Image: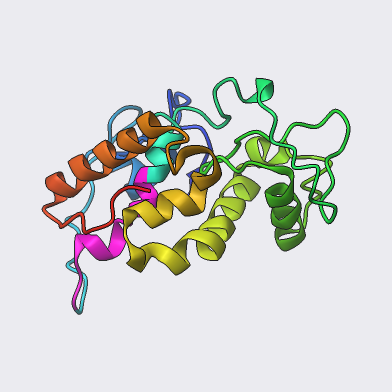
Amino acid sequence: MPKNVVAQNCGCAPNLCSSKYGYCGTGDAYCGEECREGPCYATPKPTTPSGDFSVADDVTSDLFNGIINQADFCYIEEMDGASKDYCDETNTKYPCIAGKNYFGQGPLQLTWNYKYGTAGQENNFYGLNAPETVANDPVLSFKTALWFWMTNVRPVVTQGYGATIRAINGAVECNGGNSATVQARIGYYTDYCNQFGVSRGDNLSC
């Protein structure tokens, strides 16, 4: 089992390994088979999982939304995010706090005041007053990403890849909002599906 994980994965510290997926940490998952850099070592031969298993069960379409959101996971904050307005003033339940910005942060680039407010309520932190916590706290960063995926994306995965794009950033990208980004997402997703030899399914766009 891995002993240590850090949130940023581009250029690991000297004492950490970069896994085949680009994450930093120690243990077999990071320093073993296909370790990319750092104090890598050989890993024991992996055991075969029992029962029925396929790559499609483990590699979900949401993974590829994360890839494109973070430009291969190298950014924990949205590029030029501070210059963008993600304050929905009509949402009175989670009102914006003066001086705080709700641009994309974390593995799934959480955006908008109401999402930070809900994420904070569900994960025990003050999301409206301290949205930067999603980028600065590695554990909380991934807790909010998992919460967002389970709450918003998982319920629509059977509807196709396009539905996951809509669930993550539909207000900005779908219905012609940013066709280039949508096509980039589809391109990443299709490329990886081809590499894994799995069907990309229907309803790719939004």
Q: Per the image, is 56 magenta?
A: yes
Name the image quarter holding the N terminus: bottom left
The magenta span reads 52-64
65 magenta-colored: no
The location of residue 190, given as percent across then percent down, is: 21, 44
Q: How many marks?
A: 0
For this view, does 176 lie left or right of residue 145? left
Which residue is pictured at 42% across the width and 48% down the height? 165
Q: Position of residue 55 (x, y in %)?
A: 21, 60
Q: Is residue 29 left or right of residue 142?
A: left
Residue nearest the observer in this picture, 137 or 173? 173
**Residue at x 68%, y 23% (from the top left corner):** 82
Q: Is residue 64 above or below residue 79?
A: below
Residue 13 in percent (x, y) is at 48, 25
Question: Can residue 68 be seen in the rendering of this structure?
Answer: yes
Q: How far across and down, in percent of the image, does residue 32 sit?
A: 27, 43
Query: In the rendered view, would you say 195 is above or below 61?
Result: above
Above or below, 45 against 187 in this view is below
Specify whether 137 is left or right of 46: right
In the rendered image, which quarter is residue 36 located in? top left
Q: Nearer the viewer, residue 188 or 124?
A: 188
SS majority, magenta: helix
Q: Name the image quarter holding residue 174.
A: top left
Q: Residue drawn at (19%, 66%), measured in percent from left and top?
A: 54
Question: What residue occupies the far right of the structure in this picture?
Answer: 98
Quick check: can you spot residue 26?
Answer: no
Residue shown at 68% from the left, 42% from the top = 112
Left or right, residue 170 beside residue 159: right
